[in-house]
Amino acid sequence: MTNININLKSNSPFLLKPVGKDYLWGGSRLNDDFAKEIEMFPLAETWECSTHPDGESVVASGVYKGLKLGTVLENFPEYLGTHPVKNGGLPILIKFIDAKKDLSVQVHPDDDYARENENGSLGKTEMWYVLDASKDAKLIYGFHHDMDKQTLRKSLYDGTIERYLKKVPIKKDDIFFIEAGHVHAIGAGALIAEIQESSNITYRMYDYKRVDKNGNERELHIEKALDVVKLSAGNELDQPMRVFCFKNGFATETLCRCKYFQVERMFLNTECCREMALLKTESNSFQALLCTEGCGVIFWEENQTLSFYRGDCIFIPADSVEMRIHGTAKLLKVNC
């Protein structure tokens, strides 16, 4: 740590090292599939790009190696970009989720409710990208029909809530946008990449009467959930039409665009062309690249290189150096 020069400005990309979470519904795929080498079982989540105090990423390459991402961004807030940033820090959190078992039925508050009732926290709107799913995997996404608060409250306290929940079959490459206030749960057999607001506020509504390693049922937050939940059934759930944009060496498709973040999927294949793909961030926003398949190398000035592999997350400061990227890979590109 003593060799790190935090005063040295470098607008070049760097790898991030995640923090693991051992929630009771997790499995082993994040270590098995992505070689995370985190000594934790179950390993339910890895927080890949995070400055949240409940789990902060550490820089794993470059001049800031060994520093927490938050420390770097506190010293160089311009790395975030000129786009308005809530709470003055990294506004997003990116994670991998391995659901070996069902997650609890839950809901998240919006920014206004969280700010007033959760010590100034952000709310939580999120997006799921399905990396893999077992044959019978499902998720819970809202209600079958419009609910009223009295019926919902009774069903939560007497354990009959499942009859009202909409269960949706899922498959690889599906995407789901979960607004704050929307009842949801990831089902067993799903491997997910999640992009969300930088928040860890979850209101558990129902948890199948499971117990933790100490034999205790996990805490529910029914009354807070009832304060924020959207009671309407909403529209039918359809996967959005994918529109591809082709450039030299790669193609992109927009998966999600909302006021909190934008997510694109990037198909990199420079094996079939003579030139490497160009990559550069503008002054308005940083980028985070999450490699979901394959591998590659990023090149920039003075023969600097950064190799990446499946499961790696790369942070690129706003107004970065010009880079070239080479390889065969699929990545999620996130910016604000």
Image (tube, rainbow, N blue to C red):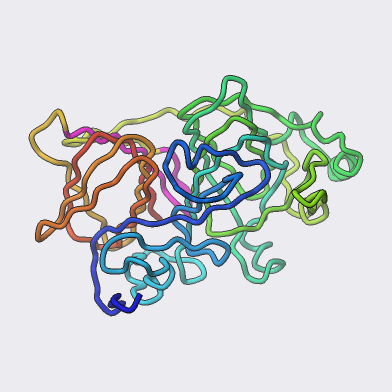
**In the drawing, does residue 26 fall left or right of residue 314?**
right
Residue in the foreground of this view, choosing between 45 and 178: 45
Q: Name the residue located 32 percent from the left edge and 61 percent from the top edge.
A: 284
Magenta segment includes 260: yes
- Residue at image position (25%, 34%) is 328
Image coordinates for residue 222, horizontal then vertical, percent: 81, 51
Q: Residue furthest top?
A: 135
The quadrant where residue 182 appears: top right
Q: Considering the image in quadrants, where does the N terminus appear?
A: bottom left
- Segment colored magenta: 255-270
Residue in the image at 53% along x and 53% along y? 20
Q: Main secondary structure of the magenta part?
A: strand
Which image quarter holds the C terminus?
Answer: bottom left
Question: Where residue 76 appears, x then y in whole percent?
Answer: 33, 74
Say if the magenta span includes residue 198: no
Residue 4 versus residue 280 in the image, above or below = below
Q: Give me the residue at 35% from left, 60% from top.
A: 60
Left or right for 76, reference 122: left
- Asked if residue 198 lies left or right of residue 2, the reply is right
Viewer-side residue, 72 vs 177: 72
Q: Is residue 113 above or below residue 22?
A: below
Q: Work out which residue is located at the far front of the displayed protein and give it.
A: 39
For the image, the number of numbered tags is: 0
Task: Tell me which corner region of the image, top left, top right, bottom left or bottom right, holds residue 97.
Answer: top right
Instruction: Indicate the position of residue 184 as horizontal and vertical percent values.
Output: 67, 40
Report x, y in % for residue 169: 61, 24
